[in-house]
Amino acid sequence: MVRHKFMSCLNDLRSKENSQNNRASIVSLIMGMKFFRVKMHPIEDFVKCFTFLQELGQYYLEVKEIEIKHVLSDLFVEILLPVAAVARQEVNIPALKTFVENLYPTSLELASKKKHIPALFPLVTCLLCVGTKSFFLNNWTNFLSICLSHLKNRTSKVALVSLQSLSCILWVYIVRIKGEKHTETQTKLHTIINSLFPKNQKIILPKDAPINIFVRIIQFIAHRINVGICAFLLIAHGLQQKEGEPPMPQQCIGAGGVGGGFRQAVIKRSFHGTNLNEALGSLLGIQSYLVPVRRAFEHILRQLDTQVCRTMMLPKQEVTQKEFDELMTADRKPKLDLLKTCVACIPRLLPIDMTKQEILEILAKVCLHVDEDVRKMAQQAMANLIVELPAYRVKTIQVFIQFIQKNVADTSPHQLDSCLKTLFHLLNNWKLALQKDGAVTPNMAEKSALYEAEGFALVMLCSCRLITRRLSVHILRKCRALSNLIQSATYDQTSKNSNDSRELCCIDILDRSVPIILKYLLPILPLSERVR
């Protein structure tokens, strides 16, 4: 209905005299379609939408008036951008392929002319982004060179639109296309980085571009993200400690390993400390940078979750060194290094739009990673959350127990024992945190997490494996110690000294039941088991 009405009005206006008023009417009509969106499903609706866009595309190719060509370009960008963000297999549908192939050559030719750059660069970008993999790889290098050449353009609008186009096509290249051969991909990425951050210069290009665009670009490149996160935390650490200007990096000029080791220790210290929230960011004067950095941190974690977390969890048996080396491909290694950096800086830096549940689930997955160093760092990150952020204590225990129940089978003893040790470690850190706080009136809701831990330990106490049962007993005892601390902060001194007021824990009931159970069990046990 809308399509037929629009085309009818457009054809009617095109049949009239080519006057300024008529051109203005055509422009207004086209702008009225800016809310039109492509229906991705079902496939029939998707095809109909691009059949309509092909008709408009034909008019775009035929029309001579610059203002109409530009407004059509803007309309296509408005419609194609949402498609580019989600399209995967849809790029192979003939209706979309035809549309892209018809418009791209003319659009690229026009984009080479200065007067068309602001309007045509976004269109060329969108056409590349919704093109097939082969179409993209065959054409993006040429457009990439054009974008890089305009980063130094004196017209700030031209430089900015070039940077925005660059960020979009780079996302498609890295995220959707997954790059090319390792060497070719690295060469292109180095070319982009050297253009944005010229060597031996303090400037970035373009000079006046918003920082969030650079953050998004760096976000796609693992090595650079690693450096960026470390540098940001180091700057925040220096501001918080009021260190002044950074010291000279003496290890760069032959000072041996001493200076380097000292500086590395400073970098590691910058990962710890008070959570960088809005209040602290405002106090340190980095609030305008903190929000985009935390938002980028969220996107980084989500990407790493799919690429090197879920796909590299421990199998049922422990991984041999040979199997580990096979998993550690050239593509995965920088991402794994980045994962280590991201895990290490939690809770100093937290993603801005991730729920506690999502953050903790990612850390729980990493606790079962094939890389031992990453596993230890994730365990320590969860322990740090418990110690430094009281709001995370209950959720950390609950989410980790739920993760074990859903993802770790009792047929995987190595994984199960590792998770039980981690749970004990988390409970122990909770106890230390309460003692450090002086057990100042914790919320009674914290007991719900202890009840879950006790229930889980009781189930694990039924295991046929001795080490699993021992770990379960340790968890039950730790739950009792925590419960006593919580009660000591909840009740007054009189109630605390009364034996009747103390709530019994599971381990108390089990301990009381042991003599009765032994009385009935010992006579029927073989002598060898009695001694044990």
Image (tube, rainbow, N blue to C red):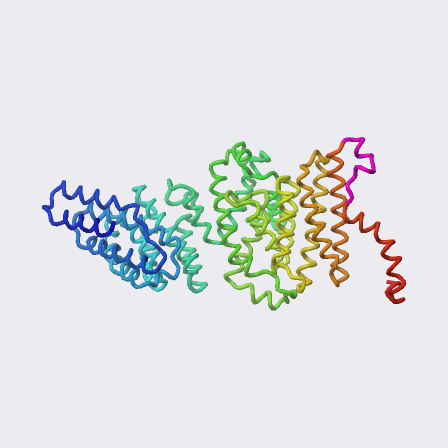
Magenta-drawn stretch contains 499: yes
Q: Position of residue 181 (x, y in %)?
A: 43, 65
Residue 314 occupies which quadrant of the picture?
bottom right
Residue 459 occupies which quadrant of the picture?
bottom right
Query: If the image is split into quadrants, where does the C terminus sit?
Result: bottom right
**Left or right: 259 as drawn, with respect to 175:** right
The foreground one among 145 and 387 is 387
Tell me which segment is drawn in magenta: 492-504
Magenta-drawn stretch contains 282: no
The foreground one among 354 and 110 is 354
Q: Position of residue 346 (x, y in %)?
A: 59, 46
**Left or right: 375 as drawn, with respect to 307:** right
The foreground one among 147 and 467 is 467
Q: Position of residue 457 (x, y in %)?
A: 72, 53
Q: Residue at x 39, y 56 (%)?
A: 172
**317 shown above or below 485:** below
**Left or right: 506 as drawn, with respect to 283:** right
**Left or right: 165 as drawn, with respect to 369:** left
**Numbered-mark total:** 0
**127 shown above or below 248:** below
Q: Residue at x 59, y 44 (%)?
A: 347
**168 shown above or below 19:** below
Q: Position of residue 167 (x, y in %)?
A: 39, 50
Outermost residue to the left: 17
